[in-house]
Amino acid sequence: MADENNKISNQNDAKVKKIIDDLTLFDDDLMTLVFNKNIPATELILRIILKRNIRVISVDAQEEMRSPIVGGRDITLDIHAIDEDGEEINVEVQGSSEGAHVRRARFHSAVMDSRMLKENDPFKILKDSYVIFIYKHDKFGKGLPIYRAERVISEIEEPLNDGSHIVYVNGNYKGNDEIGKLMADFRSTSSDGMNYKELADGLHHFKETEEGRDVMCESVKKYAEEYAKEYAEEYATDTKIEMVKNLMSNMKWTLEQTLNNMGVSDNERSIITKQLQK
């Protein structure tokens, strides 16, 4: 029994290591670790995307902003940066089309704006805000490296200049300019040959050093467990049975490990176990 458990554990570790080897900056686990508190890396991407020098004074990854309304939707910002002028910048790194919906950008912008003013502050002191989506694909399919959305007064075709800025970056862009080189770094699975040291250093640490890979291993395992619990709560028993099979196959977990990580209730645990034994 001990030998079998060791075999399963080794298989699971090998699976996690393979996942880490394949990670890029488009993956939440790696992106979060590389950019959290990393001012130089954040300044780099903002300089290239916004085409101006920006001095960042703080940056946090996966910062939660809770809705003041009971039952309202909270958001978690992939990267939340504030520059020396007090302007707020949210960078979202997105792989799926659903997560890059244009109305999500509008919502993120509104949530950030709602926190900038104190009671009785005049609206005119509201700082500029930026919501930047670095999307793995070409969001608008026109082959451009960047798409900038600004509010315009339609009748006179002049900018509103309200300080709200939304930017989409084409993660599939492969030009030989700064944006092309930046996106090549985002797609890279290794620090070797990367264009920008600020990003290469992060990849090297978390993917190519023992200390960094240990952190990544814990992050990947935690994500797998949270994923299992989240979807176990959402889907019916029949769907959970399929999830159990997939997780046992992909993560090399035992049935008991899988059910524990999914947080399956005692009643459903008995039903699932019986179904799998048929």
Image (cartoon, helix red, strand yellow):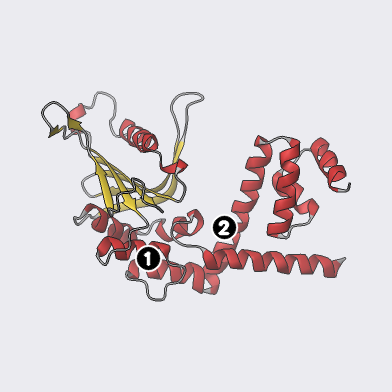
Left or right of 28? Residue 222 is: right
- Residue at the image point whose x is 45% and y is 71% from the top: 190
Distance of label 2 from label 1 (alpha carbons): 21 Å
Q: Which mark is residue 185?
A: 1
- The amino acid type of the residue labelled 2 equals Ser
Q: Is residue 53 above or below residue 184?
A: above
**Image quadrant containing the N terminus:** bottom right
Residue denoted by label 2: 219
- Depth order, front residue of 37/173: 173
Left or right of 10? Residue 179 is: left
- The amino acid type of the residue labelled 1 equals Asp
- Report x, y in % for residue 107: 37, 33
- Report x, y in % for residue 266: 81, 38
Q: Is residue 42 above or below residue 85?
A: below
Who comes first in sequence, dot 2 or dot 1? 1
- Depth order, front residue of 31/40: 31
